[in-house]
Image (spheres, coloured by chain):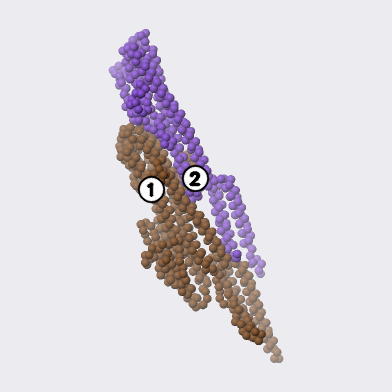
Chain colours: A purple, B brown
Amino acid sequence: MRVSANSFSDTLINQLGNLAVRQARLQSQAATGQRVRLPEDDPVSLRRALDLNSEFSSTGQYSRNIARQLELAQASFSGIKGIKTLTDRAGEIATQVDDLKSPEELQFFAKEIAEMIKQAVHIMNATNRGDSIFGGTMADRPPFVMTLDANNNVTSVTYQGNISLAETEISEGVTLTSQTSGENNTGAGARGLVSDSRSGADLFNHLISLQNNLLSGNIAAVAAVDRGNLANDESNILYHISSNGAIQARLEATDALVRERGLAIEGQVSKEVDADLAQTMVKLNQTQTAYQAALQSGARAMSLSLMDYLR
Amino acid sequence: MLGLFGVLNMGARSMGVQRAGVEVAGQNLANVSNPAYARQRVAISTSITVQSEVGPQGTGAEAVSIVSMRNAILDSQIQTEASTHGMLQAQQTALQYAQAALGTQIDRMATGAEGATAAQGVGGGHGLADSLSALFNAFQSLSANPTSMAERQTLMMKAEGLASQFRQLDSRIGSLSNQLNQTIDSEVITVNQALANIASLNDKITRMEAVSGGPANDLRDMRQAEIEKLAKFVKLDLSNGSGGAINVAIAGVDMITNNQVVETVETYQVGNKTYIRAESTDAFLDIKGGSIQGTIQARDVALEDVRASINNIANILIAQVNVTHAAGFSLSGSTGAQFFTGADAATIGVNTNLVNDPSLIQASGVNGATGDNQVALQLAQLSQVEFIFGQTLTQAYGQTVATFGQALSTVNNDLANQDTVDKMLLSQRDSIGGVSLDEEMTDLTRFQKAFQASARLITTVDEMLETLVNMKR
């Protein structure tokens, strides 16, 4: 092949240009650690990375949803525990009452029960972040309203919440609620905490009955009716304690899975877009060596011509 | 027999031939860096033969013409490949601009809004994919805290951010489309100028060759360079005209016939897109190559697909979110409000009533139940619904980016291949027509020595003549 004055320099320029482009690409990969940065680099890998990023973002949100549900479950548990303490004491009083107790003592017990009802209403009207915990989805109002008589005894406690519970998504397509409604006498859906037709629980009315029986000195009714009713209430609360514990355990287990998935996604994104650093550095060294060799050989060859020998 | 005077004439002719050789070598050396130039050679032929007592006898040599070292097939191939290169180059440029406008890249070093060091968008890490995810996450957060004003305000911010991103993206692609139109406008001016230049060179070549009888090599070089320059913009059909002229046609429409420009090109608008046609007849030019065609293809195919796809995503998002949201109830019990305004990526906005008062966001499915989150949850779960060919909205955006990336990647590969073809052809042409300093210096020496030898012949004949004249004494 005939080599002209320009073909030599043109070829050298092309070779240097190609090597410079290759060097720039490898240097960029080494500096960023990424093989794929722009859509043109590897469209398929970029697509997978975008999908994984979206999934990663969702897992972060699921973790936050789980944290919120855990917070709610813990707030609910705190209320349930308070109610349990009150029912325990109410059961004690109902058990202690017998014919040996004087009317004054019964009045004191009645007074204590009245205060316990008020305390229970207070607990059941607790809020978390401004929302009622035990009012179902009627979050903007206290779930329980009590009425008192002239002697400051509780005559009734009514529920103004509902039985709907707000479910939150904790992983794709899986929803869960850690809410507990205060009352559910419909016979369907999640059990009510203080009143539930299926378990026979009706804590406020049972406490009011105990209060009234103590006030009237009707010891027989306490023994025959109230003790049994309170046992039902306690049993229902125990159900909620275990249910709450199960929900918290499920939330923690799901959170661990979601976090693991997040870590796995990071690894998958890395596989799709990250550069093999060792391979990149070796290639970069090779390219730099070739670049140096091209420069040196080019400079040496171009410095010679026939004119160096003609006089 | 030539006789001494005949030999004297032969020496004089020989000196003329060697002088012409030196002149051509000088011309070659002067044009060593001119890429349009093809090296020239003096065609030397033996002079006429005369009869003598000892048989036919030569009368020396003479320069018959100056030949340009060109290969017509290579020139034709280079011109054809110039159109392909121009088309691919224009596509690559347009698509790279669009890639920047799309604003999606993976930056593993960046930290996202949620602390994630995974794939992020550019421009502060707010690519459309991230913004879509952020909106659906905000719906999720609202479903977990349906009465929270903080979550409602966050949702409004994310929704406004997404709407703004859609509008910006549409606007960027729209501006890019306009810029490509302007590129076509300016390239059409260059095309018409090149047509005029070629016709003018045709005219000069035919006149010069008619007078001199030999090829006007330098003018032909200039015309070939002008043709190759024009071929980068539009694919050409060339044919031989009369007297050394070249006729030029574009998409079957004659543009240059001999030394006349018989037609020019002009731009015209279809909607907001610029195309080209023949100026005097308004005939549509179905050009198959060149940068103008590359620009039109990039604008009308890849860019249009991206824009349509993003509009589709925006349209579905607006419709689905609105119909779901309208069925819900706000904290104050109001219902029926739209979440988004507009209908596509260019017009999408967020209902200003909701922005001004986030309590009006209709997250609840039951009137009066402020803690209900059914609608918020449905809105959040729209992120998992496969609306577009079995893909969610975020996946559809990823597909759009990937399809676009594939188009650019294909053009990059095609252009790299085309570069190889171009370089091989140019190298082949250079090996035929490129000037070699070594060759020219050798030729200079050769012609110089031959010139000296011819001069010595004359000196010798002169001495012989002097001897002859002195014989009389």
Residue occupying the far left of the picture: A150
Report the chain holding disc 2: B
Crowding near pointer 1: few (<14 within 10 Å), some, many (20+)?
some
Q: Which residue is mark 2?
A: B107
Q: Looking at the image, is B361 positioned above or below residue A28? A: above
Residue occupying the far top of the picture: A100
Image quarter (top left, top right, bottom left or bottom right) of the C terminus of chain A: bottom right
Please tell me in which quadrant of the rendered image residue A251 appears: top left
Please tell me in which quadrant of the rendered image residue B2 appears: bottom right
Crowding near pointer 2: few (<14 within 10 Å), some, many (20+)?
many
Q: Is residue B164 visible?
A: no
Q: Amino acid at mark 1?
A: Asn
Q: Secondary structure at mark 1?
A: helix
Q: Looking at the image, is A239 positioned above or below residue A290? A: above
Q: Which mark, by number, is residue B460?
A: none
Q: Which residue is mark 1?
A: B312
Residue appearing at x 42%, y 60% in the figure: B184
In the image, A292: left or right of B133? right
Report the chain holding disc 1: B
Q: Looking at the image, is A172 positioned above or below residue A142? A: below
Residue appearing at x 62%, y 59% in the figure: A299
Mark before the other along the chain sequence, 2 or 1? 2
Q: Secondary structure at mark 2?
A: loop
* Of B55 and B327, the residue lying toward us: B55
Q: CA distance from mark 2 to mark 1?
A: 27 Å
Q: Amino acid at mark 2?
A: Asp
